[in-house]
Amino acid sequence: MNWVLLWKAVLIFTLSAYSILVVIVLFGGIKNLKEMLDDLSSGNKEK
Amino acid sequence: MDVFATNFKTIDWIIVCVYICIPVVIGIVVRKYITQLSDFIVAGRSLRLFIAIATMTGTELGLVTVMYNSELGFLHGYSAFHVAVIEAVCIFAIGITGFIVYKLRELKVMTIPEFYEKRFGRRTRIVGGTILALGGILNMGLFLQAGARFMRGITGYADPAGLKIYMSVMLVMVLIYTVFGGMVSVVINDFLQFIVLSFGMIIGCYFIIDKIGWTTLFEIPSSADAAAWLNPLAENSGFGPIYVIFMVVLSLSAGALWQSGTLRALSAKSPRVAKQLYAWSSVSYMARRVIPMFWGIAAFVFVSQIPELVQAFQGPDAVNSQYGMPIFIAKVIPSGFLGILAAGMFAAFMSTHDSYLLSWSSVITQDIIAPMKKEDLTDKKRLLITRICIICIGIFLLIWGLWFEAPVSLWNYMAVTGTIYLAGAFTVVVAGLYWKKASSTGAMIALLAGLLAILGIGPWTKGDDVAWYLSDKFIGAMTFVIAFIGMVAGSYKFPDRNKEEKS
C-alpha cells in the first residue's frame, strides 16, 4: 500500500472540501443567523 | 535559534486584543434574547442548517483540538491521519443514517440524561448525569493548560510564570461571556470564529507549504521511524490494531453522544436538520484533525532541520511536545497574519470553553440537582444554578490545569476521560432506543462500568515500555466491552418487571 499517496490524497481532499464548505456556510449562515434572531425576538420557537 | 523566538509583534497583540473584545460585547448584547431556559441551553431550538454547521464546527474545532491534533502529528507523523479518516467516516455515517441523533431530536430532550429518565427512570438519570459531568469536566481539565501553552508558544513568552498568567486571563474572559449570553451568544460567536479560524487555517497551510516545501513535507525525517511515520498499524507507530478499534468505537459514540456536539443536533430546527448537520459536518470534522496534524508534522520536519530545536525537544528537561506546533508557526508565519491566526485560535478557545461549560453546567442543573429536588425548580432558579456551576467548573479548570500533567499525549488523555462517560452512554442510549429488552439495572451497570476508564489516566500508563494490558488504549477499549456486557447481562438477569416503577 502506498501510504504517502494515500495521505497526500487525504490532505488535498480535506483542504479543497473544507474551503468549499467554509464559503457555503459563510453565505448560508448569515441568512440563518438573521432568521434565528427573528425567531427568538418574535417568540416563534419550538419548545 | 532561540526556542521561543517569534514573529509575534505589537500589531499582533493589538489584533488579538480588539478581536477578543467582540465575543464579550456579543455576550452582553444578546442577553435580551434570553427569556427562558431553553433559550439559554438550546437557543430556543431555532438552529437552521448552515448556522448549525458553523456552531458545531466552532465547538468541535477548539484551540485544544488544534493542540492535541498537532501534538499527534508532531509525535506520530502521517500515521495520525487515520484518526481523522475514522472520525469523518463515522460522522458521515451518523448523518446518512440518523443513527441515535434523529430519534433523540424527535424526543425533544435537552440533555442525554434526560433521555435516561424517559427510558429508564429518574435514578438512572441522576447517576448518568453525575458520570457525564464527571467525565466531561475531567475531559476539559486540560483545555485551559493547552490553550495557555499555545498562546505562550506563539507569543514567545519564555518566562515559566507565563503559563499561569495566560491561564488566569483566558479563564476570566471566557467566564464573563458564557455566564451572560448562554447558547445564543455561543451560536453567534461560533459562527464568527468558524469563519475567521477556517480562513486562518487554510491560509496558514499555504504559508507552511511555502516555507517547508511540498516535497520535503512528504519526505520522512531522519529522526523518525519510516514505517511508523506513515502506517498506523506499524509496530512502533504508538497506535496499532487495538488503538484503531478503540478509535472506531470512540468516534462513533462521541460523534453521536458527546454532549456539546449533540447539543447542536438537539438545538436543530427539526430532526431532519439534525441529520443533515452531521452529514455536512463530516468535512469539518475531517479538517479539524487533518489540518492541525499537518501543522504538527510540518513542525517536526522543521525542528528536525535545526540542531538547537532538536536538542530543546529531547532529553529529561525537554520542552513539552505540545509546544512543537505553536513554536513552529510563530517562526514561519509573518507578523500581522500571525495576529489574526492567534485571534482566531483564541476565539476557538473561547467558543469551545463556552460550549463545554454550558453543556456540563446544564447537565448538573437539569440532570442532577433538579431531579433530586422534591419541588419543581423555576427557570429563573435553574438559570442561576447553571451560571454558578459555570463559575465553579472554571475554578476547577484553573486548579487542575496548574498541577496535573497528563501521563499520555493530550489526545489520549481526552479519549480516555471521554470514555468514562461514552462507554456507558453509548451502550445505554443505543440499547434504550433500539432494544426493547434493555432494563434500568442493565443501564445502571453499563453507566458505572464507564468509571473503569479512569484507570487509563493513572501513572502506570506513562512511559514507553508499559504492559499492553495497562496501556490507556487497552483500558479504553475494554471499558466499552465491559459496559456492553454489563448492559446485556443486567437486562437479561434483571428485566424491568413494571415500567410504572421507573418513574
Image (cartoon, rainbow, N blue to C red):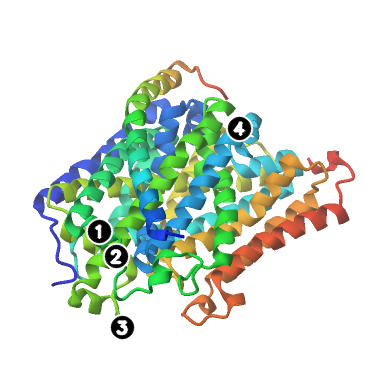
Neighbourhood count class around disc 3 (C-alpha, 10 Å): few under 14, some 14–19, many 20 upward: few
Q: Give the amino acid at mark 4.
A: Arg
Q: Give the amino acid at mark 1.
A: Thr
Asked whether B140 or B373 is in front, the reply is B140
Residue at (45, 15) in percent of width and height:
A42
Q: Are marks 1 and 3 in contact (CB under 8 Å)?
A: no
- Structural distance between the alpha carbons of marks 4 and 3: 51 Å
In the image: residue B127, left or right of residue B36 = right
Report x, y in % for residue A14. 37, 45
- Structural distance between the alpha carbons of marks 1 and 2: 7 Å
Asked whether B272 or B154 is in front, the reply is B272
Residue at (34, 54) in percent of width and height:
B292
- Structural distance between the alpha carbons of marks 1 and 3: 30 Å
Report x, y in % for residue B98. 61, 35
**Of pointers 1 and 3, the one earlier in the residue sequence:** 1
| Residue B215: mark | 1
- Structural distance between the alpha carbons of marks 3 and 2: 25 Å
Q: Nearer the viewer, mark 1 or mark 3?
A: 1
Report x, y in % for residue B385. 51, 44
Neighbourhood count class around disc 1 (C-alpha, 10 Å): few under 14, some 14–19, many 20 upward: few
| Residue B112 visible within the image | yes
